[in-house]
Image (tube, rainbow, N blue to C red):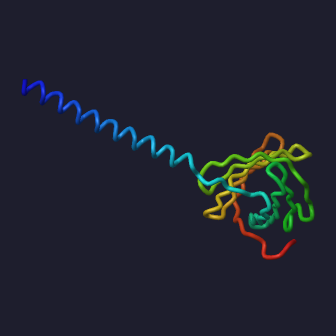
Amino acid sequence: MKKIMSTLLCAGVLMSSCVSKQEGKESKSVQEQTVKPVILVGETLKYNYGEDVYLVSFRSKTKLHWKCLEGSEQGKEATETYKLQQIGTHRVFIAWVEADGLGVSQVLDLKTNKVYSYLKIDQELVALEGIITKPTTRQ
């Protein structure tokens, strides 16, 4: 009888240990799911790629306006329809296709203030990396 009671007691301890570990996993995944959303609407950011500098204003959840301040496209600007997906606490992935067919894909890391871009021009991909700042004056 003592042997059976010992076995049941051990089984109970093991089961409660497993339940505690499982509950810990569940609470962790709930915490991971409660990432504060990154809100870009109303923000204007300056992307500095070195020779090329762009001002990007997020006008709504689906519209942004960009303007080239310096570089090979200086003076060019357009309003685009974009898609946004949050990929971390401080990171978002955004993409759009311009009227001329140029595809833009970007990861914005708002913690390190970096922008990682890929431009699809015809059948070629061009990678760019830049620094994000908030402009001090309206440009």
The percent coordinates of residue 15 (x first, y second) are 28, 33
At 78% from the left edge and 76% from the top edge, which residue is drawn? 136
The percent coordinates of residue 133 (x first, y second) are 72, 69
Q: Is residue 124 above or below residue 11?
A: below
The percent coordinates of residue 137 (x first, y second) are 83, 76
Q: Residue furthest bottom?
A: 136
Q: In this view, does 39 lie above or below 120?
A: below
Q: Which image quarter is the N terminus in?
A: top left
Q: Which of 16 and 97 is in front in this view?
A: 16
At 64% from the left edge and 58% from the top edge, which residue is drawn? 109
The percent coordinates of residue 20 (x first, y second) are 34, 41
Side of 118 relative to 99 (left or right): left
Q: Nearer the viewer, residue 110 or 33?
A: 33
Q: Which of 126 and 138 is in front in this view?
A: 138
Side of 27 relative to 40 (left or right): left
The count of marks equals: 0
Side of 26 relative to 71 (left or right): left
